[in-house]
């Protein structure tokens, strides 16, 4: 089939490449000419494992092309996937739908009369119905659940597909697009527009709630002298709870969960449902950043002024160079504001971090960051940080003091190597 993908960021570039991999002819469209040119030349302007190979293969074969022209997209596509951004509005928690509205308006003006316009962006419930009323075109909503760092795998082998459709024809077209994925046994849920939109926001709300739940337990552990890591381990053995998303630490960030729960709470409020739960989930999450800053101050004797701080990690999570709402950088920036001399190391996100936070220092290796530090903060869970040998690291730093903001390091081992070790929700090792 001939597909277009409108908006070629993290979601759209992955979707475009994976649709080509499934055998379709794909045209990616972005308003950013540099992004379209880079992708067209087979270069991925962000870090996503497996994606560069896929983009290179299909731009090479000619099955995947990129443009900035909606006229070209309209003439080309039988199905158009809209993958533009839905960031948080500057004036509150609501989603900014200007990119979505612009993309649908441009498509409605150029698409063939029988083309299917499929939204994939995460939107407030009610958006698809509004767009269907506004435009004289058939619309469907097909929310996306991919995780950055696993985006290709998640797109080719998703846990489930959700089709929000208003007609049998739309469902048939989407079934044809995803035929190889469905043939592999992927569960399909078809739904009306509001339910399809809600599946995505509810899934993110649930995941955020699970993280904030264990972080709330960390707060209680801090007050009561318990150890949240042991608590989480014991809870996770219960099949009904499960161990995933149950790690206490500096909390969640990124371009999705924080803005999605705020947009969901805002939208629910407009619909007359207060959803105070999500406001608390957000508040708990933000308090965990404060807690890590507090632990940093404690380890530095009350204030970080003048301290040399090594921050391990800048990306909001491992496997990605995405720094949108990254807890690591939020904490690093706070410490810089309090007068610390902060040096950040991240294996892939340093360039993005440097652009957004030019006043922080950046090291080329973890060892360089550690050298001479008065305090180390472990804030993004890159696997290589777990491999750091505490004895060797102790010989690099000026003072062996560490906050494990991700709750994964072996406290006893670090303490045995002479480190003062602190982690949210955990007592200091004896
Ligand atoms: P992004 O900001 O990386 O990408 C958006 C792209 O759209 C940019 O390249 C931008 O230049 C382009 N764009 C903006 N307006 C346009 C227009 N009118 N026409 C064409 N292109 C336009 O965002 P993202 O992370 O890819 O997220 C996109 C959507 O997918 C959001 O709604 C997000 O919530 C959702 N989502 C993201 C992920 C993820 O892991 N990143 C996962 C699931 C869902």
Image (cartoon, grey):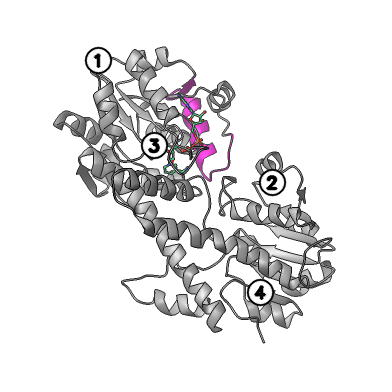
Name the residue at 48% across, 69% down: 216
Crowding near the residue tagged with mark 4, few <14, some 14–19, many ≥20 C-alpha atoms within 10 Å: many
**Residue in front for this viewpoint, 270 or 18:** 270
Q: Which mark is residue 121?
A: 3
The quadrant in which residue 391 appears is: bottom right
Q: Which mark is residue 422?
A: 4
Instruction: Find out whether the residues at labels 2 and 4 contact each other: C-beta distance under 8 Å.
Output: no
Q: Is mark 1 within 8 Å of ligand 1?
A: no
User: What distance separates the C-alpha of mark 2 from that of mark 1?
Assistant: 46 Å
Most extreme residue toward the bottom is: 430
Of circles 2 and 3, which is in front?
3
Q: Is mark 3 within 8 Å of ligand 1?
A: yes
Q: Which part of the image, by quadrant, shows the C terminus?
A: bottom right
Of circles 4 and 1, which is in front?
4
Q: Secondary structure at mark 3?
A: loop
Q: Mark 2 highlights which residue?
A: 350
Name the residue at 54% across, 43% down: 48
Crowding near the residue tagged with mark 3, few <14, some 14–19, many ≥20 C-alpha atoms within 10 Å: many
Q: Residue 357: image x %, image y %? A: 70, 44
User: What distance separates the C-alpha of mark 4 from that of mark 1?
Assistant: 62 Å
Mark closer to the chain start, 3 or 4: 3
Crowding near the residue tagged with mark 2, few <14, some 14–19, many ≥20 C-alpha atoms within 10 Å: many
């Amino acid at each position: 089939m001939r597909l277009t993908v409108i908006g070629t960021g993290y979601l759209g570039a992955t979707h475009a490449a994976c649709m080509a991999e499934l055998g379709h002819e794909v045209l990616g469209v972005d308003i950013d000419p540099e992004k379209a040119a880079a992708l067209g030349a087979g270069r991925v302007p962000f870090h996503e494992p497996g994606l560069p190979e896929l983009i290179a293969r299909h731009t090479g074969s000619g099955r995947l092309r990129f443009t900035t022209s909606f006229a070209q997209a309209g003439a080309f596509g039988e199905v158009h996937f809209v993958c533009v951004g839905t960031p948080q509005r500057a004036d509150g928690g609501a989603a900014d739908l200007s990119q979505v509205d612009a993309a649908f308006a441009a498509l409605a003006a150029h698409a063939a009369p029988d083309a299917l316009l499929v939204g994939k962006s995460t939107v407030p419930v009610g958006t698809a119905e509004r767009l269907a009323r506004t435009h004289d075109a058939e619309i469907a909503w097909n929310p996306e659940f991919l995780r950055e760092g696993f985006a290709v795998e998640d797109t080719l082998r998703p846990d489930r597909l959700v089709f929000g459709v208003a007609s049998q024809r739309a469902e048939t077209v989407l079934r044809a697009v995803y035929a190889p994925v469905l043939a592999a046994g992927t569960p399909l849920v078809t739904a009306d527009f509001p339910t399809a939109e809600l599946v995505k926001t509810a899934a993110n709300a649930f995941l955020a709630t699970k993280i904030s739940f264990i972080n709330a337990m960390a707060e209680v552990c801090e007050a009561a002298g318990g150890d949240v890591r042991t608590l989480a381990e014991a809870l996770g053995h219960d099949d009904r709870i499960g161990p995933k998303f149950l790690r206490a630490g500096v909390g969640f960030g990124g371009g999705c969960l924080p803005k999605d729960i705020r947009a969901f709470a805002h939208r629910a409020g407009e619909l007359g449902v207060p959803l105070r739960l999500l406001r608390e989930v957000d508040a708990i999450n933000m308090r965990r950043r404060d807690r890590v800053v507090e632990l940093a101050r404690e380890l530095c004797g009350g204030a970080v002024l003048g301290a040399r701080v090594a921050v391990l990690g800048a990306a909001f999570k491992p496997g990605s160079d995405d720094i949108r709402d990254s807890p690591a950088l939020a904490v690093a920036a706070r410490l810089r504001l309090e007068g610390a001399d902060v040096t950040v190391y991240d294996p892939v996100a340093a360039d993005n971090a440097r652009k957004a936070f030019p006043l922080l220092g950046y090291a080329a290796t973890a060892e360089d960051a550690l050298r001479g530090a008065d305090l180390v903060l472990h804030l993004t869970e890159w696997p290589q940080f777990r491999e750091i040998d505490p004895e060797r690291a102790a010989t690099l730093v000026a003072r062996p003091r560490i906050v494990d903001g991700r709750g994964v390091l072996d406290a006893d081992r670090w303490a045995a190597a002479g480190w003062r070790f602190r982690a949210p929700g955990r007592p200091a090792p004896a």
